[in-house]
Image (tube, helix red, strand yellow):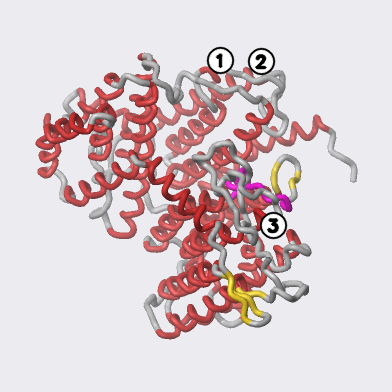
Amino acid sequence: MKKIPPTLQKFLYGFAFMVLVPLGLVFWAGITESHVRYPGLKSEAAGVLLLLSGGLLMLWSMGSLMTKGGGLPMNAFPPRNFVESGPYGLFRHPIYLGFGAMVAGYFLYTGSASGLWMVTPLTILGMIALVLGFEGPDLKERFPGKKLSPLFGLSEANSHVPGPDKRLVSLGSVLVLMITFNYLTANTDRSFPLEEIASLFSGGRDRSAWGYLNLIPLLAVPFVLKRNSDLRSWTLWSSTALLAGFLWTLVCRELCGNSWGFPGGHILNVPLYIVLIALFTPFRNYRSAYLITGVAYLPFLALQVVSQDNFVNSLILSVLLFLAVVNASVLWGWIRRLSERLANSWKEWVFGRVRVINHGFYVGGGALLGILMAGILAGEAYAWALLAFVVTVVIFSAIWAQVIEGSEKLKRPFGFYGALVGILFASLLVWALGFNPWVLIGAISVMIPWVQAIGRVRCLINGCCHGMKTENPEVGIRYFHPRSRVCSISDMKGEWLHPTPLYSILWLLPVGFILLALWHGGAAPNFIFGLYLFLTGIGRFVEEAYRGEVQTPILGKLRLYQWTAALSVLVGILFTMLQVQTPALSPGFSIEILLAALSGGLFVFFAMGVDFPYSNKRFSRLV
C-alpha cells in the first residue's frame, strides 16, 4: 500500500480538526436536542463576543507556533521550537481555550440546550484529555526542562510574595467560576449573567445588604496572602470545590431534588464552602487565629438561615467539601498507601490441581453487586437476561485479551475493550431470546462504572494495567510480590510506578454518579450508554499515557489502547445520536434477581480468580 505523502497528511489532519470537528459538533448538538431536558440559554451579544475573541486567540496562537515555533499548529506534526511568548505568555493552552470559547459562543448565539449542556462541556473534557494523555507528556519528552509560566496561570509553589497580577488572576478565576456555576444551577429563567450583573448596579435586582457579606472574605483573601504557595493553594482549593459543588448539585437534582444540593439563585451568592476556604487559607498555620476568625464570622453565616430552606444540609455539605478539599494531599497519601498495600496483598490457596486467588473475590463481588443493582433497575423480567449478558461479555473479554496479549506467561488475560465488543454480541443474544436489549444496555451502563471501580482492585493485586515509572514517591506506589505482573513480566519490582488502576477508580466514581442521575431522570438507554463510552474513553486515554506494561503495542505515537479509547469516544457520540424510545420498566427486587446476581458473581469469580496452575493449556492459568 502506497504511503500518503506528508503534505497530504498534514492537509487532511488540518481539515479534520478545522472543518470536520466543528461541523460535527454542530451536527451532534442538533440531533441530540431531545435528550437534554435543561433549557437552552440564548444571548446573541455574548455569543458573538465569545466567537470573535476565541477565533482571534486561536489565529494568534497558530500564527505564533508557525512563526516562532518553526512548524504547524498540529500535535501530530509539532513545531520544532518551544514557544513561550505571545499568547503562550498569557495562557498555557491558548488554542484550546479559544476553541472552547468559540464552541460555547456558538451555542449561546443559537440557544442550543444540547450544545451548551452536553457538547460544550464534553468538548472541553476531550481537549483536557488530549493535553493530559498526549500533548503534555510529548512536550516534556521533546523539550526537557522547559516549562510555561503564563500570566493567566497558577502561581508557582514557592515562598515568594505574589505580584498584583497573580492576585488579580486568582481572584478573577474564582469569581468567573463562581458566577458561571451559580448561573447554570439557578432554578428560574434569568437574563444572561453580564446583563444580570449590570442590573445589580442599576437597582434591577433586589438583594439585602447582608447578602453581599460573604463576598468580603472572597475578595480580600488573595490580597492578604503573603506567599505564592498560599495563593496557589487557595485558587486550587476554591476551583476544585466549586467544580465539585456544581457537579454534586446537578446530580442531586435528579436523585433527590434540591434538598441535598447546594443552593442556587443569585449569581453573586458565595457558597459556604468558599467562605470557609477563604477564612481558612491565611490562618492554616495558625489554628488559634483561624478559630477566632471563624467564630467572629459565624453571625454572618447564621444570617443565611433566613433565605435558605436547606441551610442545614448545605452547611453539612459545605463543611465536608471544605475538609475534603483542604486535606486533599492527606487524603491522597492515605489512598495511595492503601493502594500499595492492596498491590502487595496477593494470596492464593491450592486445592489439588485448582488454585483460588484472593483478587477473584473483588471482581466476583463487583459482578454480584452490578447484576443485583442492574436487575433492580430493569426489573425481575430481565434477571436471567442480565446473567446471559454478563457471561457473554466476560467471554469476549477473554478472547480479546488472548488476541492482543496472550502469551506463554499470560494464559488467561482479560481485556476491557473485548468486553465492549462483547456487548454487541450479548445484545444480539438477548434480543434473540425475546428481550429488549436497550433495557439491559442502559441498566448495565449505569452500574458498570461501579463494577469496574471494584474490579480495578484486582488489577492492583494482579499487577496488570500498572503504571510507568515516576520519580515522585508522593505519586507512585511500589510492587514487591513475586506473583504480580509488575515483578514477573515487567521487571519493575520495587520501582515507584504511577498507580494507574487508582487513577481509573477515581475517575469512574463520578462517572457512575452522573450516569445514575441520568437513569433516574429518565434519559434514554442509548444516551446513557453513549455517555458511558465517551466518559470512560477519555479517562482511559489519559490513563494509558501513564501505563507501563511492556506487552502493550505502540502505534504511531499512541498506545494501542489510546486508539481504542479514541474509537470508544467516537462510538459513544454515535450512540447518543440514536433516537431510542425509553422503555417502560417495572423496577424492584426479587429472588430471581438475587439468584442471577449470585450466579453471575460466581461465574466471574471463577473466570478471574480460579485457575489450574499445573496446566499449560490456553485459558488454564491466570499467572
Q: Which residue is mark 1?
A: 86
Crowding around mark 3 (Cα neighbors within 10 Å: few <14, some 14 to 19, many 20+) is some
Q: Which residue is mark 2?
A: 68
The location of residue 447, given as percent across then percent down, is 47, 65
Q: Say above or below: 404 vs 380.
A: above
The location of residue 487, given as percent across then percent down, is 66, 54
Q: Is residue 51 left or right of residue 400?
A: left
Q: Say above or below: 32 vs 43.
A: below
Q: Which residue is mark 3?
A: 488
User: Closer to us: mark 1 or mark 3?
Assistant: 3
Is residue 207 in view?
no
Q: Is residue 120 left or right of residue 300?
A: right
Tell me the residue at 78%/35% (across/down).
9
Q: Secondary structure at mark 3?
A: helix
Q: Earlier in the sequence, mark 1 or mark 3?
A: 1
The region drawn magenta spans 540-552
Find out whether the residues at labels 1 and 2 contact each other: C-beta distance under 8 Å.
yes
The location of residue 23, given as percent across then percent down, is 60, 40
